[in-house]
Amino acid sequence: MKLQQVMSLTRKAIDDYHMIDAGDKIAVGISGGKDSLTLLHALNGLKRFYPNKFELVAITVDLGFKNIDFERIKAMSEELGVPYHIVSTDISQIIFEDRKESNPCSLCAKMRKGALNQLAKDLGCNKIAYAHHKDDVVETMMMSFIYEGRIHTFSPKTYLDRMDLTVIRPLMYMNEADVIGFVNKMALPVLKSACPVDGYTKREYVKELIKSINNETPGVKDRMFSAIQSSIIPPEN
């Protein structure tokens, strides 16, 4: 997938859900994974001509895993002209060594978001962009249905009143396969996750479940997303 196509899908989501206003300063959460690097390129490309002028900064929350080098991410951000910041934490030690969490994902996400939100506020940002794509939306709904007994998923735009920040998800119309295609085409410097439970989570199980169902009945994932849009997250007027 070409950058122009990525920007087109990103702009559609932004316009449909009124994600960006003139004067916004948006922090892009950069994990180093394929999704966040794609989001940074998409928003930086849109910034050049989008009618509502906005600023971008990139933020990485360093979880404290050893042997993770963010220099290539830093170099990419500099090449794009986007200020890049790293916030160092001891999250990995707290979760895996001190607390020895058997189900670490929820606590890790909470601590990671807390660090990201705080630095975004310190930098004067009023919005944070997360790189959740269409597959993430569907998988989260299925996880909520299976494990929580409710029907719930990400909102395209969420206001965090305690932090006075708005979270936006501009990649929500992109398939994960398209993200992978874009990353490969652009040869982006994706970092491999150092998390010891990566690939063994409930989300990974649900991802494979949806993939299996979609292989047996093609189009299921897209129909699920359409159902989510019409019943849970309708576009704003």
Image (cartoon, rainbow, N blue to C red):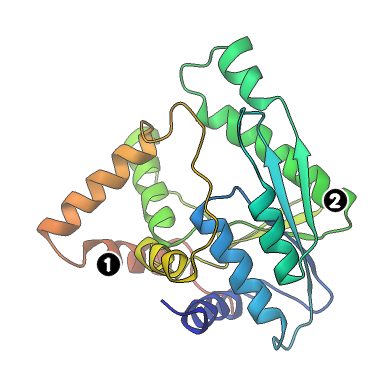
Q: Is residue 194 left or right of residue 14?
A: left
Q: Nearer the viewer, residue 177 or 102?
A: 177
Q: Quadrant of residue 208?
A: top left
Residue on which disc 1 sits: 223
Which quadrant, please, contains the N terminus? bottom left
Identity of the residue drawn at 40% across and 34% down:
148
Residue type at mark 2: give it: Lys
Which quadrant, please, contains the C terminus? bottom right
Dot placed on the residue nearer the N-terminal end, 1 or 2: 2
**Crowd band around label 2 with a 10 angstrom C-alpha radius: few (<14), some (14–19), many (20+):** some
Could you say which disc has been placed on residue 39 in the image?
none
Q: In this picture, is 125 found above or below 87?
A: below
Q: Nearer the viewer, residue 67 or 209?
A: 67
Residue on which disc 2 sits: 121
| Residue 165 visible (yes or no) | yes
Residue type at mark 1: give it: Arg
